[in-house]
Image (cartoon, helix red, strand yellow):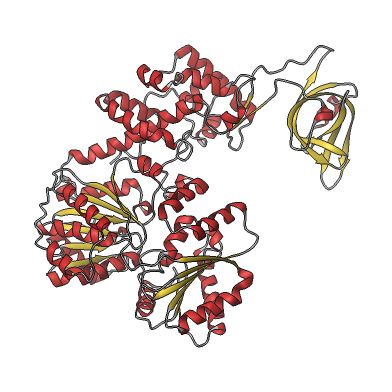
Amino acid sequence: MTPPDNGVSVTTLKGVGTALSLKLERLGIHTVQDLLLHLPLRYQDRTRVVPVGSLRSGDEALIEGTVRAADIAQGRRRSLMCRIQDGSGSLTLRFFHFRAAQKNSFQPSTRLLCFGEARPGPGGLEMVHPEYKLLKGDGPAVMSEQLTPVYPLTEGLTQGRIRSLITLALEWMRDQGLKDLLPDTLLQQWKLPSLPDSLEYLHNPPVDADQSLLLDGKHPAQRRLAMEELLAHHLSLQKARERVQQQGAPALKATGAFSRPFLAGLPFELTGAQLRVAREVARDLQQPLPMLRLVQGDVGSGKTVVAALAALQAVENGLQAAVMAPTEILAEQHHINFSHWLEPLGIRVAWLAGKVKGKAREAQLEAIRSGEAQIVVGTHALFQEEVRFADLGVVVIDEQHRFGVHQRLSLKEKGRNGERSPHQLIMTATPIPRTLTMSAYADLDCSIIDELPPGRTPVQTVVVADSRRDQVVERVRQACDEGRQAYWVCTLIEESEALQCEAAEVTAERLKEALPQLRIGLVHGRMKPAEKADIMARFKAAELDLLVATTVIEVGVDVPNASLMIIENPERLGLAQLHQLRGRVGRGSVESYCVLMYHAPLSKQGRERLGVMRETTDGFRIAEKDLELRGPGEVLGTRQTGMMQFRIADLQRDADLLPRIHQVALELKTEPALNDALIRRWLGTGDMYAQV
């Protein structure tokens, strides 16, 4: 993160040279303001001395005692052992790193003030490498008057060093002042403390501070900062949206010239939810402002038909539409669907992915450039500079969370000469909790397809230990003997695709031995795209009974005859991914099952996750639980893109603030300078949302 324009560099503080500033940079600290916003993880109570005799294992405490003896123990690892006592009991201080001078300072009868964690040792309780101070004379030890903060650190930086730096930063704040950007009326209305008061309190809480409230992040001083940070993120996304909309977009009339025959040719009726969302999209497309709409719909809810209707509205107005998916398998599935539906209407559907090479690629690029290709389906290959559209009117992005926000917004440059922004329809089958939608997607309007097509039966989920593998294999045999098909999913063993694919290959061989009568196929990430496509096509045509696969089949595979899925080691996957995988079965009218075959012992979180999968097929409930257990960066798939990295706010904990933040953002719309200052304070000049 780059420092704000108005930030005072941390090197202005006494004692901060190049070496120290580089260490601070690793913590995201560039300015004095960054240092002030580097909040403690927790607090220690050094305001009172605790009798040694009252200590229990795990207690973190301040003790005072007299040295009885100090010796070097020659065990597996040399250590300095210092035995101290007070009137209530005795305790050993153990140091693995020490100097001779340190041992010599521990003379019998020397008084020490120590702080550390009591742990069990060979001769009773010990403190390993405690902080300590030699006490001179008989006077009482000087105690801290506030709770002692414990900060996040990086290599080469100690608690003592960062505490002294923050003390300097607080002095700078008292002397120079740190501007409170939130209006007084707002602070009074929300009963919030000022920014300087909040920071003073959080870095130096009084002895009587409610530590449980501070640990939970729910103290008014913390809420004050979380609220301002969430507001800055919200304003930044709002700003990104305004920049996109400043360009204008083609107003696309809904003529029905293609959409009416398309709907008439479908072998099914649209659900009420599909019709409602299709109308919302059609209405947006008729405006001269770029549509920015997120369509959420559970696996199998029929989002692709809504996407096809949006694409047709562009074609009806003589413009092109692009449909982009994150994987070749999913993009290929879309290409098959769109070609099957739209080519009978005389619409040319082009296909562009990494595997399209040479003359075939050149031919597709020329068809896109000339406008002959009215609808273009592809992977992130569509982002590439060489891809030029004749006149792009609508962009559909499937599983948006697999792409960065900045990638999505960069697509506007694919509009006519980069002067007119195409409409954007973003789709996801990963239900996103409302709290995340309001913050991560504050630049989008949201629609939800909350109804499954008729005839779909809910998938029954069973959780079993892998010690019952033989019974699970027998269940697969029975299902296939009855004319059904099954998936066997092997999850990641290491952070290595090679090992994952190897595991899938071994599993496929074992299943072939155990089930010789079945036709078994294998799909994994290291196979050539053509091989993968061939196996998938054979499975879809019922030429294979059992498909062994890695998680590459998570999205985009539609085989209504598949009614059983086995997921090995489901405890290794997030809830959203498990839900996506499970959505590959239950796509027909026959009762379907998903068997989660875990490896014991399960962690507490693992038990909770699998319990949720067993109890519900409601994607939104699963998403809420996923957010609670894994956090927003994981759920949105944004840890890699650097998005949603909050310093203080927590989307789960602070969810109740979001509706009010939405309201405040609207009220502050007329104050652009204030908005910019808030964004700079929390996101710096490298604000990734607004750089579009």
The quarter of the picture where residue 563 lies is bottom left
Q: Give the camera-side residue of 523 and 593.
A: 593
Q: Depth check: 484 or 630 in front?
A: 484
Which residue occupies 43% across, 37% down? Answer: 655
Where residue 628 appears, x then y in whole percent? 50, 46
Q: Which of the pair 361/684 is nearer the observer?
A: 684
The correct choice, above or below, for 539 with respect to 223 in the image is: below
Q: Quadrant of the N terminus?
A: top left
The spot of residue 145 in percent (x, y) is 66, 16
Q: Dividing the picture into quarters, in which one does residue 687 lie?
A: top left
Q: Residue at x 50, y 88 (%)?
A: 517
Drawn side of residue 61 relative to residue 395, left or right = right
Residue located at (53% from left, 84% from top): 515
Residue sitting at x 80%, y 18%? 135
Q: For this view, does 355 lie left or right of residue 83? A: left
Quarter-wise, where is residue 524 in the image? bottom left
